[in-house]
Amino acid sequence: MHDSEETSSNPKDGESEEVDHELEKIRLKRMESLLRQQQQSQRPNTSYTQQDKIRMVLQAIMTPEAFRYYLSIKDRDENLANRILQIVLPPTVMRELDLLIQYLSQGMLRSNIIDMLQIQQLERKILGIGPKITVKKRDGESTDLNSFLKSNNK
């Protein structure tokens, strides 16, 4: 009777080993699939130049109007555009462009977060242009607010 218990327990052990083996096969297939997906998602980014990657990121994080305005700045003053770029994408971010593009493509980051007004503010700050309010008098003459207030207080 003792021998029959051993033989009846062996098939169960064989079944559990078979199930474990099947589970291991499934796990391996899933890991291989995940690795392939990861490699494919990284592969397209490697074929782009650094400038292409920067352009892709800028297009994603800027509104269309802001991006067009940035390109117009780049056409007329390359140095100013580079300084704006350094503020928008600092060196620590530039080193991780591939990862940033991957996050953007997966929808993990918000897009269109920089508008044209912010680009204009950066441009004015870099150029040293402060805020300026102009007052138009009845005779059509325009003066800045400071001069207008000084002339009216006299």
Image (tube, rainbow, N blue to C red):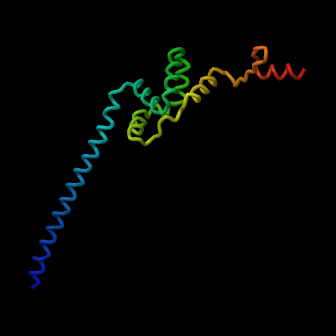
Q: Position of residue 82 (x, y in %)?
A: 52, 22
Between residue 94 and residue 120, name the one nearer to us: 120
Q: Is residue 66 left or right of residue 17?
A: right
In the rendered view, tell whether residue 116 sits above or below residue 151: below
Q: Is residue 139 left or right of residue 87?
A: right
Q: Position of residue 133 (x, y in %)?
A: 72, 23
Between residue 39 and residue 103, name the one nearer to us: 103
Q: Is residue 140 left or right of residue 49?
A: right
In the rendered view, tell whether residue 60 sits above or below residue 70: below
Identity of the residue drawn at 34% across and 30% down = 46
Identity of the residue drawn at 53% across and 30% down = 88
In the rendered view, tell whether residue 57 sits above or below residue 10: above
In the rendered image, which quarter is residue 125 located in?
top right
Identity of the residue drawn at 28% across and 44% down = 35
Between residue 93 and residue 107, name the one nearer to us: 107
Q: Quadrant of the N terminus?
A: bottom left
Give the residue at the far bottom of this rendering. 1
Q: Position of residue 100 (x, y in %)?
A: 43, 36
Identity of the residue drawn at 12% across and 71% down = 11
Give the residue at the far front of this rendering. 138
